Image (cartoon, rainbow, N blue to C red):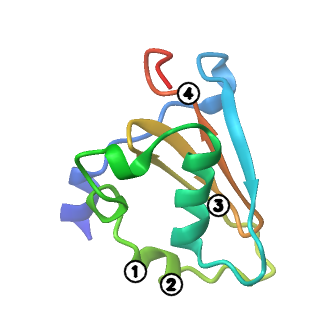
Amino acid sequence: MKFLFLLMKPLLPLNDGEFSLLVRHSIDSEEEMTEAVVDAFLAAGVDVYDRPTTLAGWIDPDVFETLQWSSSRPLYLGTLIWDHYVVITPDQVAIYTAPGGES
């Protein structure tokens, strides 16, 4: 676990005014989390199929299955995907501007 911590880079706080929201995508009860993330990027105008990497190149999709999204505790996952800051909750995927303001 210590090794994993050394590889992970902390995200900058999203409340410091440097990032603006591109899209909030509500997650359908039938939708898989990986599908919701891809759909959110498509809704934000990011062509994920034209990218040199896949979603699995940014985050292990098994993480979505491991987390207990239906627990009564507040839960969110914040990470960098396709050079955009992404915050995932059980109900939605929020995508923010890329570092430097690129979309």
In the drawing, what numbered circle is on residue 91?
none
Number of other residues with Cα within 10 Å of mark 4, as a class: few under 14, some 14 to 19, many 20 or more: some
Which residue is tagged 4?
A: 97
Give x and y (percent) for residue 90.
Answer: 72, 70
Q: Earlier in the sequence, mark 2 or mark 3?
A: 2
Residue drawn at x 67%, y 16% is 17
Q: Is residue 66 left or right of residue 57?
A: right
Number of other residues with Cα within 10 Å of mark 3, as a class: few under 14, some 14 to 19, many 20 or more: some
Q: Given this view, does label 2 or label 3 mark the residue nearer the observer?
A: 2
Which residue is tagged 2?
A: 65
Q: Given this view, does label 4 or label 2 mark the residue nearer the observer?
A: 4
The residue tagged with tag 4: helix, strand or loop?
Answer: loop
Number of other residues with Cα within 10 Å of mark 1, as a class: few under 14, some 14 to 19, many 20 or more: few
Q: Earlier in the sequence, mark 1 or mark 3?
A: 1
Inspect the image, locate mark 4, and give the three-letter code of the amino acid beneath it.
Thr
User: Marks 1 and 3: CB-CB under 8 Å?
Assistant: no
The residue tagged with tag 3: helix, strand or loop?
Answer: loop
Query: Marks 4 and 3, how far apart in space?
Result: 18 Å
The residue tagged with tag 2: helix, strand or loop?
Answer: helix
Q: Earlier in the sequence, mark 1 or mark 4?
A: 1
Inspect the image, locate mark 3, and give the three-letter code of the amino acid beneath it.
Tyr
Which residue is tagged 3?
A: 76
Q: Is residue 57 left or right of residue 49?
A: left
User: Marks 1 and 2: CB-CB under 8 Å?
Assistant: yes
Number of other residues with Cα within 10 Å of mark 2, as a class: few under 14, some 14 to 19, many 20 or more: few
Residue drawn at x 37%, y 60% is 55
Q: Given this view, does label 4 or label 3 mark the residue nearer the observer?
A: 4
Which residue is tagged 1?
A: 62
